[in-house]
Image (cartoon, rainbow, N blue to C red):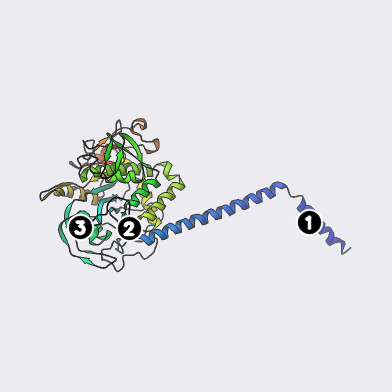
């Protein structure tokens, strides 16, 4: 009797196990696969993020200009201030709170690059763009400062060599990078504008090409065909989607647009940046993980960020804040200038208009641009809306539905925010570059 009972229990257990429905095993197998795949996906995402963060950190640049011991952040991925400048808190993931300012610098003849024409005698900061986002995240002002702007420059210290350069007077802005790197450009623009700049990014030719490719091309427009041998730009009349070296040539072209001046080139750059911003904030980009990763990877590998900006969390918080701003609330403006009396090929600040603009920027007040405020080489695309008009037609402007302008600010908000004589456009506008005559 004692032996039989255990055998009965064992046989009963086996019988119960043998009658388990087949779907139970299928579900358990499927759940196992889901868990394994989920863990693998998270692991791969973590590895990718770590690699990007490591790459960004290894390429980061000290912009303290000698004002701190090492110009590095204390926390690694999130850093604060201009190098170690106090007063800029490390942001958490989520839209960055309050106002912030970034200086974007395009470097000509950067070290190590090849295949972009003949080598130049010196490295220059050819493109200088000041981006200020207002504290309420309802407006932003993007100021393009001409490379040929003749201004005073402060004492600068090269963070790599520790060499100190004496202050200079009446020097073109594009020489600042040779006097102490990105930090000297930041210090020079701070001195000229009165705006504190905690963050900066340095783009090489390769970086510009990589970013244009990563976003899948940018739409631009020309009033007629452009063939500029000096920049290498060949562009058909009407709307084109450009990427790679064509995008770089478009941004660099002076003799193919407008009056051949740097101010004409700035208008084309603003048209490009407006189109790029519409593309980057469109649903087709924000919901595409592959494209987002390509953008992050292109930036990490080709753009040198200040140590204060060299963290993925910092970049994400900025993008989330920027995404909240209506396209019509983002004004791309030219820094106001006049011809230099000592050199007709250079420019000097317009003392009254420049002071008015920078006072507005420092206060975080929005800027409204009218239809007559476009730069010297820009016109509205055919049937495209202005910041005060209706939405444009994708059939006539080449703008896809996802890139159409967002609603304009209310008249009450914009009526007191215009500055007479200011030139530029909003991110909601699609403009065409005016091809140079002849």
Give neighbour class at mark 3: few <14, some 14-19, many 20+ (Cα, 10 Å).
Answer: some
Q: Residue at x 40, y 43 (%)?
A: 216
In this rendered view, identify the residue nearer to me: 269 or 129.
269
In this rendered view, identify the residue nearer to me: 53 or 352.
53
Q: Residue at x 18, y 46 (%)?
A: 336
Q: Residue at x 35, y 31 (%)?
A: 393
Give whichever of discs 3 and 2 has the lower sequence position. Answer: 2
Outermost residue, right side: 1
Asked if 260 appears above or below 148 in the picture, the reply is: above
Is residue 125 found left or right of 151 in the rendered image? right
Q: Is residue 171 visible?
A: yes
The C terminus lies in quadrant: top left
Q: Position of residue 268 (x, y in %)?
A: 27, 42
Secondary structure of residue under mark 1: helix
Q: Which residue is under mark 3?
A: 191
Give neighbour class at mark 2: few <14, some 14-19, many 20+ (Cα, 10 Å).
Answer: few
Secondary structure of residue under mark 2: loop
Q: Which residue is under mark 1?
A: 13
Q: Position of residue 335 (x, y in %)?
A: 21, 47
As measured in the structure, the alpha-carbon distance from the residue carrying label 1 to the one carrying label 3 is 84 Å
As measured in the structure, the alpha-carbon distance from the residue carrying label 2 to the one carrying label 1 is 74 Å
- Label 2–label 1 contact, CB within 8 A: no
Q: Position of residue 166 (x, y in %)?
A: 18, 64
As measured in the structure, the alpha-carbon distance from the residue carrying label 3 to the one carrying label 2 is 30 Å
Numbered mark located on residue 44 in the image: none
Q: Which residue is under mark 2?
A: 112
């Amino acid at each position: 009797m004692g032996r039989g009972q255990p055998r009965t229990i064992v046989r009963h257990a086996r019988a119960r196990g043998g009658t388990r429905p087949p779907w139970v095993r299928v579900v358990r197998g499927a759940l196992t696969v889901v868990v394994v795949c989920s863990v693998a996906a998270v692991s791969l995402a973590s590895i990718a993020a770590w690699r990007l963060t490591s790459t960004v950190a290894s390429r980061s640049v000290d912009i303290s200009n000698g004002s701190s011991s090492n110009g590095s952040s204390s926390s690694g991925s999130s850093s604060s201030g201009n190098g170690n400048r106090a007063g800029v808190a490390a942001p958490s993931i989520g839209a960055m709170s309050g106002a912030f300012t970034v200086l974007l610098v395009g470097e000509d003849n950067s070290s190590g690059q090849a295949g972009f024409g003949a080598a130049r005698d010196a490295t220059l900061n050819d493109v200088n763009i000041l981006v200020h986002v207002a504290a309420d995240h309802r407006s932003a002002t993007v100021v393009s400062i001409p490379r040929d702007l003749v201004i005073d420059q402060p004492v600068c210290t090269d963070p790599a060599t520790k060499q100190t350069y004496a202050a200079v007077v009446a020097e073109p802005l594009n020489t600042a990078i040779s006097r102490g790197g990105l930090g000297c450009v930041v210090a020079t623009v701070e001195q000229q504008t009165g705006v504190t700049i905690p963050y900066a990014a340095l783009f090489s030719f390769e970086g510009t090409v990589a970013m244009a490719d990563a976003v899948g091309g940018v739409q631009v427009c020309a009033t007629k065909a452009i063939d500029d041998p000096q920049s290498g730009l060949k562009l058909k009349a009407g709307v084109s989607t450009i990427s790679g070296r064509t995008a770089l040539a478009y941004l660099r072209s002076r003799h193919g647009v407008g009056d051949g001046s740097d101010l004409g080139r700035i208008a084309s750059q603003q048209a490009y940046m407006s189109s790029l911003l519409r593309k980057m904030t469109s649903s087709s980009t924000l919901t595409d993980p592959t494209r987002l990763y390509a953008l992050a990877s292109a930036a990490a590998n080709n753009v040198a960020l200040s140590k204060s900006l060299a963290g993925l969390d910092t970049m994400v918080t900025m993008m989330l804040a920027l995404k909240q701003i209506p396209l019509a609330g983002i004004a791309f403006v030219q820094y106001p200038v006049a011809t230099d009396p000592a050199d007709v090929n250079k420019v000097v600040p317009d003392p009254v208009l420049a002071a008015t603009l920078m006072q507005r920027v420092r206060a975080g007040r929005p800027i409204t641009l009218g239809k007559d405020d476009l730069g010297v080489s820009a016109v509205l695309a055919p049937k495209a809306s202005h910041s005060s008009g209706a939405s444009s037609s994708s059939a006539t402007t080449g703008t896809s539905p996802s890139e159409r302008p967002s609603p304009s600010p209310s008249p009450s908000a914009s009526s007191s925010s215009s500055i007479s004589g200011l030139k530029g456009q909003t991110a909601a506008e699609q403009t065409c570059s005016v091809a140079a005559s002849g």
